[in-house]
Amino acid sequence: MNHEFRLEHTKEELFDFFRRSPGHYLYCIGDLDDKFWRLCKWYSISQDQQIKSVVLLYHGVDPPVLICPHFKDNFSHTQELLNRVKPLLPGKVYGHLNDGLLNGSHGFRVLSDSGRHYRMMLKQLAPASANAHVRKLTPSDLLQISELYAVAYPGNWFEPVMLEKGYYTGYYEQEKLLAIAGTHIFSPEYHVSALGNITTHPEHRGRKLATLVTSQLCSEIIKSTPIIGLNVHAENAAAINLYKKIGFEILAGYDECLLGNEAMSSLAI
């Protein structure tokens, strides 16, 4: 079958494809935002001027991140696209490859494996009671946020601009931040959010504070972003159970790993 391989796209035509299955393409939708758009390279194959599959190379980090989602109706298209994209990629990429793609004949070498992950999507938000200890966080909370992550979630990806562009909630007790939940993506324009940076101070775990702040966060952002998802490591049973209680369900599995590209070409970024 003759498919057209494309490198140039508009936001409108990409979003028109992504909304066929917004949960699978959640992070791709988030990267349509102006602050990420210039850091992205989009690759697609089309037939009769209709996009069949899209993969994303995000080069705002080193190594770049290769995001390869698929849903049940376009798995073979995504396999084909990945094979065609490979010669254009750099020597190393950090892959997010949905189920089945890592084992395909794409010629990548797994240099390090971060394990299997799940994409979870909010299906039915469980009722949440307001709590006086929970409030929206602002840049004025940055010092306490940084201190909490240092002891409770070292190595996580957090940038201060997330407080201005996203939505974060925190649980305070005696003016001390004990738990936090935030968004990696918050896009009212495209009606999607992706949760992240959720943690509780080690001395206060077991009190269900993470459940409380995450539930309150979802109650707020669902007003403007009805499509809400997150990524979680498949072995993090406690977090998965927490999200299920709030109303999330597993949508798909994917592999996270550092990949070596044996077909690196001079066209690599």
Image (tube, rainbow, N blue to C red):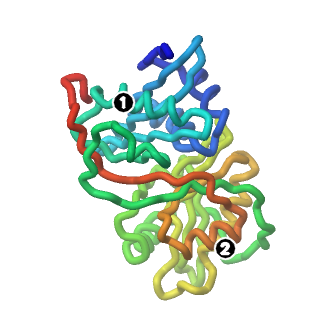
Quarter occupied by residue 22: top right
Q: How many marks?
A: 2
Name the residue: 53% across, 80% down.
Answer: 176
Quarter occupied by residue 179: bottom right
Image position of 25 (left or right of 124): left
Mark 1 to mark 2 CA distance (whole Å): 44 Å
- In the image, which is nearer the foreground, mark 1 or mark 2? 1
The relative height of residue 238 versus residue 187 in the rendered view (above or below) is below
The relative height of residue 260 versus residue 56 in the rendered view (above or below) is below
Quarter occupied by residue 92: top left
Q: Nearest the camera: 175 or 12?
A: 12
* Residue 125, percent from left and from top: 76, 61
Quadrant that contains the C terminus: top left
Amino acid residing under circle 1: Asn
Q: Which residue is mark 1?
A: 83
Q: Which residue is mark 2?
A: 212
Image position of 152 (left or right of 173): left
The relative height of residue 174 versus residue 199 in the rendered view (above or below) is below
Question: Which comes before the other along the chain, label 1 or label 2?
Answer: 1
* Residue 267, percent from left and from top: 24, 23
Amino acid residing under circle 2: Leu
Q: Residues within 10 Å of mark 2 (few under 14, many from 20)?
A: many
